[in-house]
Image: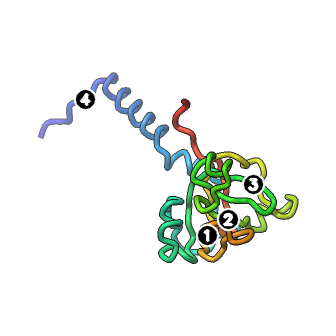
Amino acid sequence: MSPPRPRSITRRLMIAASAVAALRGSRAIRMQAAEPPGPAPGRPDGPIVDASLIQLIADPDRFDGKPVRVKGFLHVEFEGTALYLSGDDANHLITRNGLWISFGPDLARGTPRGMGPKQYNRKFVLIEGVFDKTLTGHKGLWSGGIREAWRVMEATKYYND
């Protein structure tokens, strides 16, 4: 058997550059880099279900009591901290298009009335917590809630309009 044919240096560089570009463009790699190392405080054991707000609102029984990871537009306010489908839903207070958010003690510590991380107010975020279909917030206005959220981070913006 003859020895393998050596590849040109240019071809090797092109393959390496493609691999780096693929890793940089990977959402999973970006999310891992933004998360703190190790398990999040307050996170229950078991897998976290990736869900959309639409799935949680449309089929609450399926997700009730499960740890979830969801993205949406966060509005942080006394008696109105919620995750919405869009900024317009938050601006027009379309509460049925949102979920009440209750932050865990590690995130709520040091904030007035335990409202949670104000630095994420009016931004698209990723939140991890336990979905609770009965947590409908102040006066029962929302479609459910995320209780004891243990992780909040700004969502990656992919396009600038």
Q: Is residue 69 above or below residue 144?
A: above
**Nearest to viewer (mark 4 / mark 1):** 1
> In x, y percent, where is residue 85?
57, 53
> In x, y percent, where is residue 158?
52, 37
Element at badge 3?
loop
What quarter of the picture does the C terminus occupy?
A: top right
- Say few, some or many: other residues with alpha carbon within 10 Å of mark 3 (under 14 / 14 to 19 / 20 or more): many
Q: Amino acid at mark 1?
A: Gly
**Nearest to viewer (mark 2 / mark 4):** 2
Identify the mark at residue 31; answer none if there is no mark.
none
Q: Is residue 117 above or below residue 19?
A: below
Identify the mark at residue 100; answer none if there is no mark.
2
Q: Is residue 160 above or below residue 35?
A: above
Element at badge 4?
loop
Mark 1 lies on residue: 144
Q: Are marks 3 and 4 in contact (CB under 8 Å)?
A: no
